Amino acid sequence: MNHVLNITTTNTPAVVERLLQVTRYRGYELAGLQLTPRSDANSLNITLTVSGDKPIHLLTSQLHKLYDVQQLELVSAELAVLSA
């Protein structure tokens, strides 16, 4: 199952590394990543697409705990389409 998360974080050197580390530790695979600096240059908008069979709340609850995360929104949860 694919999940898309919109995350607003502070713009620090290690923020992306922390997000990806938590994602990996929780057993999700990275399917897409988009970074966009906000107009104030102190924040980033991150669109994180992950895939995994575990409930998404296991990941979102851990991402909320990161001190760099200002806002987190689950945009969509859709089934992965397999083609032969």
Image: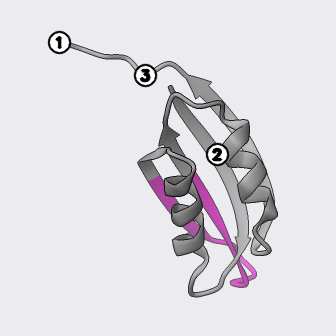
Q: Earlier in the sequence, mark 2 or mark 1?
A: 2
Type of secondary structure dominating the magenta stretch: strand
Q: Which residue is mark 2?
A: 5
Between the C-alphas of marks 2 and 1, the distance is: 28 Å
* Cβ–Cβ under 8 Å for marks 3 and 2: no
Closer to the camera in the image, 45 or 16? 16
Q: Which mark is residue 84?
A: 1
The span picked out in magenta is: 33-47
In-image side of 31 versus 53 (left or right): left
Task: State the image coordinates of residue 82 (x, y, percent, origin top left).
Answer: 30, 16
Q: Which residue type carries mark 1? A: Ala
Task: State the image coordinates of residue 2 (x, y, percent, origin top left).
Answer: 51, 31
Residue in the picture at 49% in, 55% down: 24
Residue in the picture at 75% in, 81% down: 40
Q: Residues within 10 Å of mark 1 (few under 14, many from 20)?
A: few
Between the C-alphas of marks 1 and 3, the distance is: 13 Å
Closer to the camera in the image, 73 or 23? 23
Residue in the picture at 17% in, 12% down: 84
Q: Which residue type carries mark 2? A: Leu
Closer to the camera in the image, 19 or 73? 19
As drawn, 39 above or below 46: below
* Local secondary structure at mark 2: strand
Task: State the image coordinates of residue 48 (x, y, percent, origin top left).
Answer: 55, 51
* Local secondary structure at mark 3: loop
Q: Which residue is mark 3?
A: 80
Q: Which residue type carries mark 3? A: Ala
